[in-house]
Amino acid sequence: MEGIDFAVFRKGNRAEVVRLGYLGRSERDPVPRLMEQAIALTTGCKPAPGSKETGVPGDTGEARFTLDCG
C-alpha cells in the first residue's frame, strides 16, 4: 500500500497488522492510516474506532484492532 507492505492476521473479531520492512522516521506518518486500510481491504471489515492497541505507544510496526463487520 503506497509502497509499504503489511501482513494482516485475523482471529474472530480481532485483527493484527504488521508493517514489513524498515522505514525511516520521516516515512512513518502515513502508516497508521495505511494499517487501517490494509485491515479493511483484507478482512472486509472496518477497524472499530478507538480500538487500536500497540505494544509500544506510537509504534508504527504493529497494531491490533477490534473489527466492525456490521
Image (spheres, grey):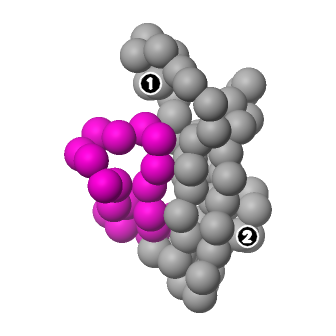
Residue type beneath disc 1: Asp
Against 25, is 36 above or below?
below
| Residue shown at the point (75%, 62%) measured from the top left | 42
Query: Residue at 58% across / 41% down in the picture?
Result: 19
The magenta segment is 47-65
Q: Which residue is mark 1?
A: 29
Task: Judge left or right: residue 66 versus residue 15.
Answer: left
- The quarter in which the C terminus is drawn is bottom right
Q: How many marks?
A: 2
Residue at 45%, 66% in the rendered image = 65
Q: Which residue is mark 2?
A: 44
Q: Is residue 37 left or right of residue 31?
A: right
Mark 1 or mark 2, whichever is nearer to me: 1
Expressed as whole percent of the image width and height from the top left, the position of residue 44 reads: 73, 70
Query: x and y percent of residue 6 in the render?
Result: 67, 45
Residue 21 magenta: no
Q: Most extreme residue toward the bottom, as rendered? A: 12
Secondary structure beneath label 1: loop
| Along the viewing direction, whichever of 61 and 44 lies nearer the viewer | 61
Mark 1 vs 2, N-terminal side? 1
Q: Is residue 49 visible?
A: no
The quarter of the picture where residue 3 lies is top right
Residue 64 colored magenta?
A: yes
- Using a 10 Å C-alpha cutoff, classify the residue at mark 1 as few (fewer than 14 neighbours), some (14 to 19) or many (20 or more): few
**Image position of 15 with respect to 17: above or below:** below
